[in-house]
Amino acid sequence: MNKPHLIIIPGNGSSDKIWAEKARDYFGDDFKSVSVQYYDHWSNGGELIDMKVELNKLTNIINSLDGNILILAKSIGTVLFMFSIHSKSIGPSRIWNW
């Protein structure tokens, strides 16, 4: 069976970057590739995720990958992922059913 790609979508806080990178390192060998969603507000001093900007980035990440994907999301990352499905930016058929 082909391994899916893992996309890690962290929570809002900049400390969640560390969580996401630890998860990336832990799961790295188990997937075809592992991508972390890095939020713009972490580097520009903002307090909250910009859903529109981050949805566009997430869509671009997924569209650059072939095959199935698996999502590991935390907190606002879960909301972003659900928004991507609701807005039809990501087709549910791409999501790997474990």
Image: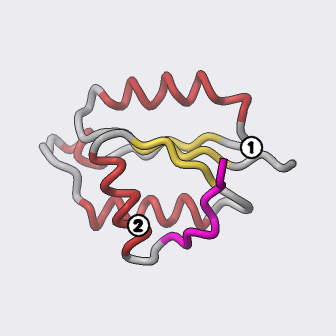
Residue holding disc 2: 84
The secondary structure making up most of the magenta span is: loop
Relative image position of residue 31 (x, y in whole percent): 71, 39
Relative image position of residue 16 (x, y in whole percent): 32, 30
Relative image position of residue 85 (x, y in whole percent): 43, 69
Q: Which mark is residue 32?
A: 1
The residue shown at (42%, 60%) is 57
The kind of residue tagged 1 is Lys
Residues rendered magenta in the picture: 90-98
Q: Is residue 48 left or right of residue 5?
A: left
Q: Is residue 28 above or below residue 79?
A: above
Relative image position of residue 29 (x, y in whole percent): 73, 28
Q: Is residue 9 above or below residue 82?
A: above
> Label 2, label 1: how many angstroms apart (C-alpha)?
22 Å
The kind of residue tagged 2 is Ser
Front residue of this view, candidates 90 and 35: 90
Question: In front: mark 2 or mark 1?
Answer: 2
Front residue of this view, candidates 64 and 44: 64
Mark 2 surroundings: few (<14), some (14-19) or many (≥20) residues within 10 A: many
Mark 1 surroundings: few (<14), some (14-19) or many (≥20) residues within 10 A: some
The residue shown at (56%, 69%) is 92
